[in-house]
Amino acid sequence: MKAIDLPLQNILTSALPADPITDNYRRQVEQAVYSFVSPKPCSKATLIAYADELATELGLDFSTEQRQAWADLLSGNSIQAGWKPYALCYGGHQFGHWAGQLGDGRAINLGEYSAKTGNVTFQLKGAGPTPYSRSADGLAVLRSSIREFLCSEAVHFLGIPTTRALSVVATGDQVLRDMMYDGNAAYEPGAVVCRVAPSFLRFGNFEILAARQDHVTLKLLADFTLQQYFPHLGEPGKEAYLRMLAEMADNTLEMVVNWLRVGFVHGVMNTDNMSILGLTIDYGPYGWLEAYEEGWTPNTTDKDGKRYAFGEQANICLWNLWKLANALYPLIEETEGLQEILSAFPVKYKKSYLAMMRSKLGLTTSQEEDVFQIRHLLDLMERDRIDYTLFFRSLSQINAKNVGTETSEILIRETSYLGASILEPKMTDWHSWLAWYTGRLQAENSVDAERILAMNAVNPRFVLRNYMVQLAIEAAEKEIIPKLILCINFPKHLIYS
Ligand code: AMP
Ligand code: MG
């Protein structure tokens, strides 16, 4: 086994105030952005999966003879000289209520790696307790680790900003979990995911400092964020903070419109799960639309409230941005600029969402009627339980020549979860919508071959449906994958071509 050198810098910890206590016990951490903490060694680190493309992009060698060394490093079992691992302190609004201090309860940051595209932080999720673990164990199970690993890579290859996942390492330890939340806890195999992102800072990192009225640390964090991630916005000061919030809002908007494009539902958009860079972060009870349903949520604890349902996600982004703006207020002390940014959000969202939906339909011009016709289409899709991914993928085959024929009947029948006899009386509505659609294509002189290419570039052929993740988890739990090592790559040409 060859030793690996993973050179990491301590950029964040050198610049920002640390918790002076270094013993690892649960506590409230004040006047600090993070606490130094060491990962918990595990019994037997085994590399289960790694993301080939990301490893190559970072210039990391995962060839066979290196894998055990990677397993030890990426489980937290071995810490290299010079690394100073730490857990971040943050708070958050959970399901609409202030939850106080949360923090990296089961994530430990190793430090920053200098990649060709810029610095990225390496973070281990599930590597043991931290001062922020509250009553939990700081661990993660194989099941949830595979869910996070596969989904963050899938979201990346779908062209959506996200934290990445480099690896999953089984720890050889058993972790007690109540999978169904029904009081029947059982032991499950433990694992650690190595996540990689330019920053893991969240809205909640600012909120906790503002809630404690610690404006000194708040300013240090804002200045650090500005200089590290938004250096083009100028020197620290009120104007620059406002520009930074505006850019955070724009990035958040881009993220959510992309989620809506591919039918992704995050499931738990608390402000502690909102990245300051507009990255999709914290893959927990996420899901993907099958039949189109705006009120659908994969999160069983949100089944009644539906706060984080598919169709609510843009509103929730804005709600969360208000909380971020409130947290930055003590540094700006004027409401006008903040309000202006937040009022612009729904306007920009409307425009951006409409442009995105037009692109899904293969339309290159805009007409006033589009808003109504897109709404009408989504209503029909919801009524007739049409699969969101399959429908838009197949729609590219429809044109003015085949619209009234068997082709359009097949499109609806094959993408609906309803039986043919139930669909039969509903087909007239589809014929009229499709007639409008193909008329609209004709009016803009749409060229079939060009439109198909353009539509296929935004309407994915595959999303990570739950059953696919489930198959991977079952294989891993049967120890099929540990023998093979899952090396994933979701090539873009496969997803969109
Ligand atoms: P989440 O709902 O996963 O975003 O987590 C909310 C908060 O709970 C975060 O501060 C997490 O770090 C913490 N947390 C979740 N699971 C665990 C765990 N097993 N051990 C310690 N902290 C946890
Ligand atoms: Mg979280």
Image (cartoon, helix red, strand yellow):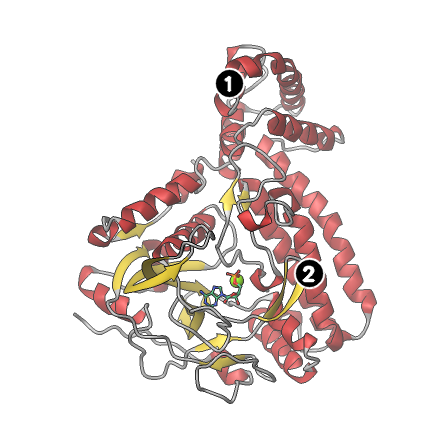
Task: Tell me: 177 left or right of 281.
Answer: left
Residue holding disc 2:
321
Task: Tell me: 58 left or right of 12.
Answer: left
The outermost residue toward the front is 183
The x and y percentages for residue 243 are: 70, 66
Q: 237 above or below 405?
A: below
The x and y percentages for residue 79 are: 32, 78
Q: Residue at x 38, y 70 (%)?
A: 127
Residue holding disc 1:
419
What distance separates the C-alpha of mark 2 from that of mark 1? 43 Å
- Residue 1, located in which quarter of the rendered image? bottom left
Residue nearer the viewer, 368 or 192:
192
Q: Is residue 402 visible?
A: no
The outermost residue toward the top is 405
Instruction: Name which of mark 2 and mark 1 comes first in the sequence.
Output: 2
Circle 2 Cα neighbour tier, 10 Å, few/some/many (<14 / 14–19 / ≥20): many
The x and y percentages for residue 310 are: 60, 43
Q: Is residue 11 visible?
A: yes
Q: 42 above or below 304?
A: below
Q: Residue at x 79, y 62 (%)?
A: 339
For the residue with label 1, is its CB less than 8 Å from the closest atom of ligand 1?
Answer: no
Question: Which SS class for mark 2?
Answer: helix
Residue nearer the viewer, 56 or 261:
261
Checking the image for residue 372, the label placed there is none
Task: Name the quarter where the C terminus is drawn.
Answer: top left
Residue nearer the viewer, 244 or 388:
388
Q: Nearer the viewer, mark 2 or mark 1?
A: 1
- Mark 1: amino acid: Gly
- Mark 2: amino acid: Leu
Q: 413 above or below 479?
A: above
